[in-house]
Amino acid sequence: MISRKPHVIGKPFPLIEAQRKLTGVSCYAGDEELPPDTLHARILFSERPNARFHLRNVRKARRHPGVVALLTGQDMTTRLGYSIEDRELLATSQALYAGQPLAIVAAETPAAAAAALALIQVDYEELPKVLSIEEALTPGAPQVHPGFAGYAGADKLNAEPERNVAHAQAFIRGNADEAFAHADAILERTYTAAHLQHAPLETHGGIAQLQEDGELFMWLHIQAPFLQRKIISKALRLDPARLRIITGCVGGSFGGKVFVSIEGLLAAIALHVGGRPVKLLLNREEEFKGVFISPAMRARIKMGATRDGRIVAMQAAYDWNVGSSVDADLFNMQATTLAGTGPYAIPNVEINTRAIYTHLPPTAPLRGLSVAQEHWAIEQHIDEMAELLGLSPFEIRQRNLVKGGDHLFPHFTMHASGLATCARQVADAIDWRLSAPVLEEEAAPEPTGRGRGLAIGWSPIIFADECGSRVIIHCDAEHICDVIVDGVDTGQGLFAFVTQLISFELNMPVEWVRVMPTDTGNYDPSWLATYHNLLWSVGHALLKATAELKHQILSYVSESWQEPPTNLDIVEGEVISYATKRRLSLLTLLMEGVGEGDAPPVFEVTATYRPPHTEDGSIDGWLQFFTATAYAVDVQVDERTGNLTILQMAAAADVGHALNPESVRAQIKGGMIQSVSISLLEEMIFEDGVPVSLNFSDYPIATTADMPQKLHPIVVEVPQQSGPYGARDLSHHVQVGAAAAIGNAVYRAAGVRIYDLPITAQRIYDAIQARRQARQG
Amino acid sequence: MKHEIQFILNGETRTMAVESQRTLLEMLREDLGLTSVKHGCSTGECGACSVIMNGEVVNACMVLAVEVDASEVMTVEGLAQDDGLHALQKSFIDHHGVQCGYCASGMLMSAKALLNRTSRPHEEEIREALVGNLCRCGAYADIIKSIQVASRARR
């Protein structure tokens, strides 16, 4: 059945990806039906951080029945990285972190692969290590990467490897030091946020096979196939034209399946098994210890304000514990520097962002380029500042809010934004009248256990150098319109958006549009597709492509009809002439052509979008705009136990124009739940550098039992003039502000401020005890 | 040593010879090709492999294949009806009960078992029924709504 009326922009649109996911169709890692000659790969991970090691019994393992290939760092010295090659594919003689791959085996059965690795004995000689930012920065501390200067890409980073500083970025406006002298109130605080696990339910995995013609095929479930093609082909010295990555469904990425983790090993072993397919699928424990964790944060903020509530100066030092690799974090260094003041126009600013190497696993930001963690610090700081000045949380924010027209960075002037609207609407949603100058809660002499908190945020939409989006639309008799985009649907609704946009622009039924799996084979080998902010990037490419396709179709018909193309249009799946009232179904056109004896036509367009940018190396060279968010929460704290209950949570996001409103609300609600999980429950724990959070019992993530009792998702629409249909990206910016709103509410509820994420019941309890003792003492 | 077992899978009688240590998850996914039954943790923590066994939701990774002898097992493959998708599946599509989708099969099974017991569950009952099914995207609110709407549609 074909619905004749195309779905339009801004109206409900079904998730086209959903049906196959709900019927159990095979599309995720491990679902593939395997040819009988498939081999099973397994990785040997280091058990110790920073240790020289020796592998014994490797030859015995190689001879184990069923083993086809076994690689160690002695067989291949291969460095891995996109901007900076600060990782080894397989450790050669020294493991930098517990969980680093030491060997990979491919065998006839999973059991044979496991048995072979069990034969290998690893002797470790432990070396002094650094695990925290403080340890790494201590003068004379062990250097994580003594060979840093020799790594490809080292010259592009602003590093001090001897001090374990992998990269540093700064932004300075005015003169903060001088301005502090004129401030009436100055507040200095330190905040931290823990390492997190991306924890997708689908673990990392895939299949690789060397084809007879020498091309390496990989079937992966990742967020950035074009980036991975570049990294893997560079590491293994393959011609990128001979490495083809086809992407299936992605069962959760959240930033953890962007950069290469196990995929490089899978490619390497597939080159050594005589063309047989190799399958690799991590189990849950391997997923926890063997891929990426998120960088941990230490933020030191000093802020000065005048009595009337104007923030006149801010110094912020954001230090990120990036573990043993910074390669996947360079982008969030830039994002957190740009967002470093929070959404406030402060005349005198000094932001210093540093990535610090330690002997922990490689890091990659978890959803939102670490801007959410940064706002944990900023937005609690603002609240404490407000209290110091006798202002309400709303007032201090309103007095300092960044506004459209503010010239913030060399090339960037702030656009119109729904920041203030977001703040007002979240407060309204939980019945909090924030306009009153002094809050009821503050008037109460003792905390009552119940409190409300507010936080707002902004998150920059930036793109990496070289990145763009390219789409191909192919229409013919067989397929009607097949679309290939270079972005991946990770559950954010990209493919639904693609279908919606094409059916809208070409005014034809959605059933005629089919989005094909993302496949690097359709693109030239140098192409690097952007892998986030896809609404913006893919959206612009699609608008170009559909305009060109429509032009092709109308030109073709106009020639046959001998009418000027300007008379023609496509309306509800038909080419029509406004002049002669002739009509021709697009289907008929594609099946039969226009007239007698006409061969059916084929239309194909490729369109590329490159975001506007300046290449002068300035920090905002690739900055497009900011997405605004706000959170308000209403919490209950049990003072006897520290237990926290979130009664209500409201989140607002300014998406410019909600093209698929239900989908936007779904993203906001999901972002709220994931924020609750990250803010209250999650912390990757290491004992002496060895991860001990290796399953969902030791690393709990939110269940339905942890949901706030009431959720209020709010969509704000202040159009982004430069966006597709005035829209802005949302999905990975949606969590900004959540943690701080909870922190601020805890303060109002229990009279204690928590400076370290996650906000565990233990931390609240300890803070309440400390407060009581301080009073008694 | 292999054991012969007979059970009803999605309404059809099946006979299988299985090793004693083989889990129900391995048998369903690998031997019978039912890819709806997802592998998430192998330790009964995530619920991705939830199936219905004799009317109750179980984590297939925590049940041995030999235990289903003489039992009745249902997976998502048995949910769709002759005239198309089950009301739950339709509702999940319409109400955005899916993001990345990896948890969806397990959610559907927990929901189905709940609706078999209680035709019009309250929100609190749905939350409770889903507590063993993790969703990393945090789509719980829309999953709950999908189940509520489906339960009303069934009447």
Image (cartoon, grey):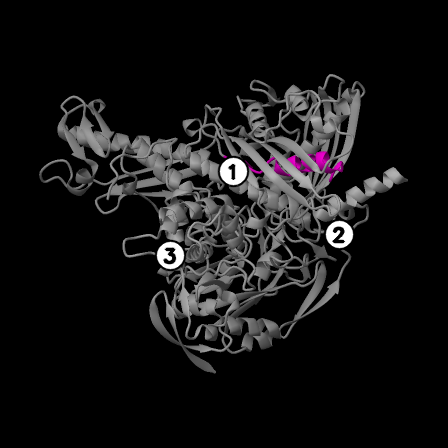
Label 1 to label 2: alpha-carbon separation: 38 Å
Crowding near the residue tagged with mark 3, few <14, some 14–19, many ≥20 C-alpha atoms within 10 Å:
some
Which numbered disc flags the more N-terminal residue, 3 or 2?
A: 3
Circle 2 chain? A
Which SS class for mark 3? loop
Which stretch did the figure color magenta?
Answer: A730-754
How packed is label 1: few (under 14 Cα within 10 Å), some, or many (20 or more)?
many
- Check if residue A751 falls in the magenta segment: yes
Which amino acid type is shown beneath numbered disc 1?
Ile
Residue corresponding to mark 2: A130
Left or right: A448 in relation to A682: right
Report whether A522 appears left or right of A580: right
As helix, strand or loop, the secondary structure at mark 2 comes to loop
Spot occupied by residue A184 in the image (x, y as percentages of width and height): 79, 20
Q: Where is residue A738 in the image (x, y as percent from the top left)?
A: 61, 37
* Disc on the earlier residue, 1 or 3: 3
Give the answer, above or below, for where A579 lies relative to A375: above
Q: Residues within 10 Å of mark 2 (few under 14, many from 20)?
A: many
Nearer the viewer's eye, disc 1 or disc 3? Answer: 1
* Quarter of image, res A375: top right
Q: Is the magenta stretch mostly helix, strand or loop?
A: helix
Q: Which of A317 and B26 is in front in this view?
A: B26
Residue A20 visible to an observer of this rendering: yes
Residue visible at 41% across and 27% down? A725
Marks 1 and 2 belong to one chain: yes
Give the number of the disc on residue A25: 3
Q: What residue type is labelled 2?
A: Val
Q: Which mark is residue A668?
A: 1
Q: Does the rendering let one see residue A133?
A: no
